[in-house]
Amino acid sequence: MTDNFTPEEIANFTAFEKEGWSRVADAYHNQWGTVSAQSAPALLRMAGVQSGHRVLDVATGAGYLAAAAHDSGASATGLDFSAEQVALARSVYPDVEFIQGDAEDLPFESESFDAVVMGFGMNHLPRPERAATEACRVLKPGGRLSFSVWAVPQPGTAFDIVLGAIEAEGIADPDLPTAPPYFKFADPMQVQTLLAGAGFDEISTVVIDQHWRHSTPDQLFSVFHDGAVRASAFLRSQPVSALDKIRQRITNEVSGMKRGDQYVIPAPAAVSAGRKPPVGG
């Protein structure tokens, strides 16, 4: 974002994200948590997390990754820029340490952690290259960073269904703060550039299957309308007549995805990782 956007645009986007995540802390936890937590095992595995390791979970939200690391025997700390998210994480996982802080300016000494993880946060940062550089700084030599973002939409996946409905029925360019490309770091080449530039090697990206399991076909619309930040703002900016058409189009498509007594909607994640080179290479 810093290559093409002004300081004012960065400040506006940061304020928009912080207000949004503070406002939807509970809604995201209730509506997105069941799917976003599904990539936790892959994130911990790709970060090389082991019992006894010290692990930092950046953009922790409700604390899923920090809690998973804690449960594996690691010493975990979760960090988020939103006081509301930190309070939520502390209430959900009272045995795990959570603090408020900035992903782009981590409040830790260099070489403090064996692993750094970030679940669905990199695509929400105005300066992701700073976050990657900070992650490398606080890692011990040989430590690993892993992070997840939503995979590039493919036909029949949640983001394809919702974005397709918006494109077909909605206003394409609502008045929202300028933002970085949402799926940028689902591209392995962009990940390579980001992490290599921050000092990482052994860089890799894999796609992880995840699914929403809903009891009614209209829940996917509600998830995006009520439980997100950019997606919710985009939907809420639509005229009522367009919003009704978007809702109906999403509901109609999800209606054909019933498996037993549930509607199963794919929502795959792209999980990437890199290693801070050990001393001496």
Image: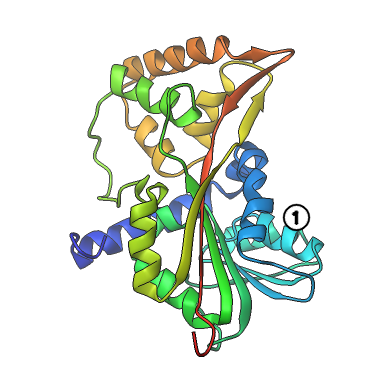
Residue at left 31%, top 48%?
A: 181
Position of residue 57 measured from the top left corner of the image (x, y, whole percent): 61, 66
Position of residue 197 measured from the top left corner of the image (x, y, whole percent): 34, 72
Callout 1, which amino acid? Val
Instruction: For label 1, count other residues whose C-alpha is less than 10 Å away and answer few (under 14), some (14-19) or many (20+).
Output: some
Above or below 17: residue 3 = below
Q: Is residue 91 left or right of residue 235?
A: right
Above or below 122: residue 78 = below
Quarter of the image where one finds residue 131 = bottom left
Residue at left 48%, top 49%?
A: 149
Q: Is residue 13 left or right of residue 122?
A: left
- Residue located beneath label 1 in the image: 92
Quarter of the image where one finds residue 95 = bottom right
Q: How many labels does the image show?
A: 1
Q: What's the coloring here?
A: rainbow
Position of residue 151 measured from the top left corner of the image (x, y, whole percent): 46, 41
Residue at left 49%, top 27%?
A: 157
Q: Quadrant of the N terminus?
A: bottom left
Foreground: 187 or 261?
187
